[in-house]
Amino acid sequence: MEDRTREYLRGRFGDYYRSMNPYNPLSAERREWGFIPWTAGTGTIMKRHQSLLDMGGLQEFLVANRPKHVYFSAGVYQKPGTPSMAGKNWMGSDLIFDLDADHLHSFSSEGSTYAEMLYACKEELWKLLDFLTEDFSFQNLEIVFSGGRGYHVHVRHDAIRELDRSARREVVDYILGAGVELETIVQTETVSGIGLRNPTKKRSVGAGGGWDKRIHSAILERIDELRDMENESAQLKLQEFEGIGSKKALNILSIIDKKHKEIEMGNIDVHPDFVTWMKKLIPNIVENQSASIDEPVTTDIHRLIRLPLSLHGGTSLQVKPIKYEKLDEFDPLEHAVPDRFKGRDIKISVEGGEDELVDLGGETFTISDGINIIPEYAAMFLMARGEAEKVKETKN
């Protein structure tokens, strides 16, 4: 990035901070603060171990320093400005979740557009929110677009504040479905009655909650899909699982048809071939239903996370808080564009490559090699991403 471009971005970030009301997290004075300045070169310098007292007030600090990135800690401390973690005297931490396009297990960012990556990340966000609201019964979640490639979710709840790393690891493992397989979710009960010489064991799924319930519901959905298919297509679908050939697939379809009511009630011991399929199917269900969270972010009680309403130095987009009820309609490429950067066009220079389409602010721009005159918010997006340079303005 050229000096002119960097100074332009830094100046406009300062204008933004001068005009906004900053976001102050709960117990802001007890949190550690950090930021990354607009330095020359490719290296990144993180300045942390700051307290609000050190900074002289949040807005004053933002206006004076015009940082590239701004962060605050998940943890609260007695002495947040102390330079050693041990000396800060930890008092507890929020539970933070980070979803980033780079960590999605069901999506490859290679060859994908920025909009496609953000869409895939939002799908994972819905999965995560389902876990947090349904399985953990958390309320008043704070959902934030990161300004870059994903989303953050902040959980502030008395029940989790003092959880240590190992306890947070358990939360992560649950959301990832770690260790969830047929034998770990199956419920076994003894069945006896008239006509039975010896008690027998009945194994079932879906009797409890959590992953047990999730998997039972998903099994029934898969079975309904198979029953809606033509017989030959359903056989081929089953044969996608290793170890299930045409004969076994045909038998499973017959079992599904004859034993559907028992399977609906959770019984999996309807036939050995059905159990074989279940052992293959459940890992697939876990992969599809688990949320691709960035594990170290959640387990780290001292983590720094982006400040909502700040600007992301790699896109110039807002780190945007989102109300749960508005999440479905939220479009980061439109709603995270700062109003401060709307209303005028500027010149940027792009070197090399083919024409590029940029979707931003509800518009689509064609960016060509050479000089481009486009709205400032789109130009800042490209400059922050390192794809364009600011052209020196000339007076007529």
Image: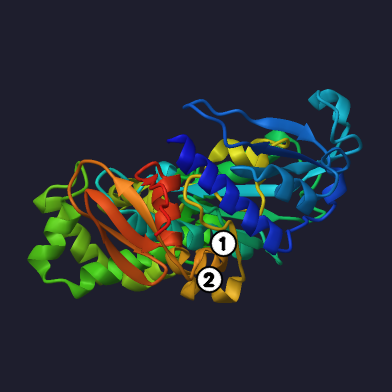
Residue to which mark 1 is pinned: 129
Q: Amino acid at mark 1?
A: Leu
The tag earlier along the polypeptide, 1 or 2, is 1
Query: Which residue is at the front of the view, 231 or 393?
Result: 393
Residue at horizontal 20 percent and vertical 63 percent from the top: 253
Residue at horizontal 91 percent and vertical 37 percent from the top: 78
**The N terminus - image quarter:** top left
Image coords of residue 295 (percent x, y):
55, 39
Query: Which residue is at the front of the view, 18 or 278?
Result: 18
CB atoms of marks 1 and 2 within 8 Å: yes
Residue to which mark 2 is pinned: 327
Give the class, few, some or many, for how many residues have Cα within 10 Å of label 2's Cα (few <14, many ≥20): some
Image coords of residue 351 (percent x, y):
25, 41
Q: Which residue is outermost to the right?
A: 78
Is there any visible trace of residue 309 in the rendered image?
no
Q: Which residue is outermost to the front?
A: 396
Please state if 39 lies on the left or on the right of 165 as rendered: left
